[in-house]
Image (cartoon, rainbow, N blue to C red):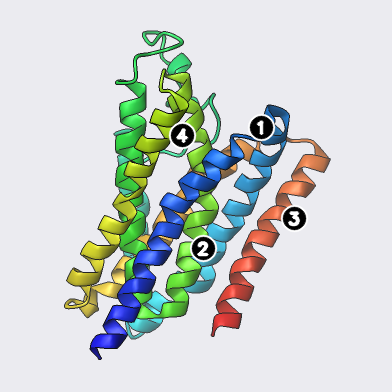
Amino acid sequence: MEHLHLSLLTQIILFSLLGGALSVVAASAFLLFPERWRDSLLPHLVSFAIGALLGAAFLALLPHAITYAAGDVHNITFTVLLGLLGFFLLEKMVLWRHCHSVSCEAHAPDSHPEHHHHDAPGSTGTMILIGDGLHNFVDGVLIAAAFLVDEHLGIVTALAVAAHEIPQEVGDFAILLHSGFSRARAFVFNILASLTTVAGALLAYYSLEEAQSLLPYVLAIAASSFIYIAVADLIPGLHKRSQLSATSQQVLLIALGIGVIYLAHSTLH
């Protein structure tokens, strides 16, 4: 039994790193591409992430939450509703945000007249890092909770987290550089913020292991997190490109994201 726990904990740590630190490394590598490549690829990554998040929420997390809660659908859906409202309030407090370009309206330095084009690395950059650290901590809790219910569900959840973290980290990097951070400093601080994913996962593993009855409600919160990010933060950005060709690409990539989660979930099972 001890070996099983160690194996499960190892998986939780590894997949938390996939959703956190490895996403930062992938995003920093992405920034080495020519700018025109980045500008054309990033919207595609966002579209894919929308599909992955919605697929994980509706095809994996919610079904498992309802099953694990012995069919108590009302309380699970009520928890999802509370989660959506909670993430809305967190975003209002600038503690939960998703920027996917340097021109992110809510957090780019230029969006606030009082901020100069190159702020000292202490205002905009600090808020980005605090918000990112909190967001990653919650991601770690959600990944661990999913693993505690079912290892395959944990893998699917981590894949969905990684899918949306990579374009977000690209946006975070761009904003940090724009607000005065050097490339090396931005990378180090982003890595440190990403390690809160592992901290959240470890906390959840040791606390939720003894509180199994809470697991379906944590999965419901995970589903609400994924739905909120996809619908409130990512989808509005797609409406900026309304041409038929762009819309077709978006729909296909969203479907691809859903398909990857569907195949991963059904194949792993």
The answer for how far apart the CA atoms under marks 1 and 4 are is: 20 Å
Residue lying furthest right in this view? Answer: 245
Q: Amino acid at mark 2?
A: Leu
Answer with mark 3 or mark 1, whichever residue precedes in sequence.
Answer: 1
State the separation of the CA atoms marked 2 and 3.
19 Å
Asked if the residue under mark 4 is in contact with the one under mark 1, i.e. CB atoms within 8 Å, the reply is no
- Picture layout, residue 32 above or below residue 7: above
Residue 198 picture location, percent across and down: 31, 58
| Dot 4 or dot 3, earlier in sequence | 4
Q: Compared to 66, does 173 lie above or below?
A: above
Mark 4 or mark 1, which is nearer the start of the sequence?
4
Please give left or right for residue 226 compared with residue 73 in the image.
right
- Which amino acid type is marked by label 1? Lys
Q: Which mark is residue 39?
A: none
Tell me what residue is drawn at x 23 percent, y 73 percent. 214
**Element on which disc 2 rests:** helix
The numbered dot on residue 252 is 3
Horizontal and vertical percent for residue 231? 52, 48
Asked if the residues shown at circle 2 and circle 3 are in contact, with their CB atoms under 8 angstroms apart, the answer is no
Disc 4 target residue: 172
User: 1 or 106, which lies in front?
Assistant: 1
